[in-house]
Each structure stands twice: as C-alpha cells, then as structure tokens.
C-alpha cells in the first residue's frame, strides 16, 4: 500500500510538509524522486512538525481541529435542513472542509454567485470542478472558516436569494 498526505489540513494550511507510506522496496526510489523535485527542503516547517510531535501536541491539536470542524459542518447541515429542505440537495461529509450542494436544474450557480457575493456570501461554482459540462446548478460550500452563527447567516442569505 502506498499513501501520501500532508500536514497542511491537520496542523496549518500554509504548512507545506507532506509524507509518504510506501513498501520498503520503494523507499529508495521515493527518496530519489523527492530529492530531485526540490532545491531546498522546507526546514522551518519540518522543524515545526517535528516539535509538534516531540511535544506530543499533534493528536490533541487534531482532536481540537476535528471538534471545531464538526461543529461548523453540523451548523451548515442544520442551516441547510432548516432553510433549503426540499429546494436543494447536498452531501453530508464525514470530514473535510466543504460540502457539495445542488440547487436544482432551474438555478444557474454562476448567476447566483454574483448576487450572493454582493450580499456578502461566496462559494465556488460547481462548473469549476468539471472539465466539460456539468455542475451548472451546483456549488461547493466551505464550512471551515466561519463560526456556526455566520454559517447559518450565510445559508439564510443563499436561501433568500434562491
């Protein structure tokens, strides 16, 4: 099994430190590729991650981040249930920073985005995630930044604009 990830979502968004889990037989090739793809390793970010683990702070921080994101996700899901039940469909993510909403075939998410932005709410149009046609009535909503009260307010604004 080969696995790759980073600490940018679990420690800090700007922290560009990643890791691989690879079979022993592939370690040399991965080391060689890593060394050939960058001029200088990010020593300070690597030291930050190292210290976080040395001081046993990673897992408590991860638990804290999960709790915050769970509350924000639940606030968005609750607001969507309250404001858009029957008018739109959305994903129910188990984790992460975003959810996907489909406003229905009669809604142009690009046009909605313009009006929403004027009203102080933004999202990423669904079409931005398709190489061809698709996503015209969809959006990716972020629940990772705003506190629950602002999330509910943003969903209320979207519902009103629809």
Image: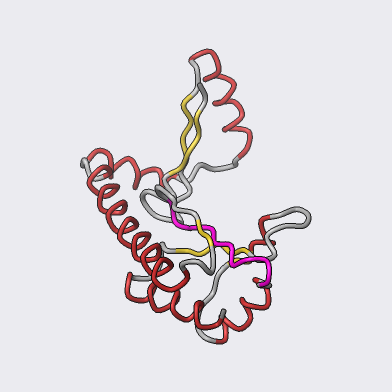
| Name of the residue lying farthest toward the top | 25
Viewer-proximal residue, 92 or 8? 92
Question: At x 46% / y 56%, what residue is drawn?
Answer: 14
Residue 41 falls left or right of residue 138: left
Question: At x 77% / y 57%, what residue is drawn?
Answer: 133
Q: Which region shows up in magenta?
A: 96-106
Check residue 105 for magenta coloring. yes
Residue 54 is drawn in which quadrant?
Answer: top left
| Image position, residue 131 (x, y; %) | 75, 53
Residue 61 falls left or right of residue 22: left
Viewer-proximal residue, 40 or 21? 21
Question: At x 48% / y 38%, what residue is drawn?
Answer: 5
| Image position, residue 47 (x, y; %) | 36, 44
| Image position, residue 136 (x, y; %) | 70, 65
| Name of the residue lying farthest toward the bottom | 118
Q: Is residue 1 visible?
A: yes
């Amino acid at each position: 099994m080969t696995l790759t990830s980073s600490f940018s979502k679990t420690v800090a968004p700007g922290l560009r430190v990643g890791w691989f889990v690879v079979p022993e037989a592939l370690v040399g090739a991965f080391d060689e590729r890593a060394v050939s793809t960058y001029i200088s390793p990010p020593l300070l970010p690597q030291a930050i991650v190292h210290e976080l683990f040395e001081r046993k702070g990673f897992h408590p921080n991860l638990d804290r981040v999960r709790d915050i994101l769970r509350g924000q996700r639940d606030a968005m899901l609750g607001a969507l249930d309250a404001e858009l039940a029957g008018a739109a469909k959305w994903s129910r993510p188990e984790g992460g920073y975003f959810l996907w909403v489909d406003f229905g075939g009669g809604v142009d998410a690009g046009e909605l985005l313009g009006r929403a932005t004027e009203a102080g709410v933004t999202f990423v149009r669904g079409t931005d995630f398709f190489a061809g046609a698709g996503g015209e009535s969809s959006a990716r909503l972020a629940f990772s930044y705003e506190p629950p009260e602002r999330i509910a307010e943003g969903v209320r604004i979207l519902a009103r604009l629809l």
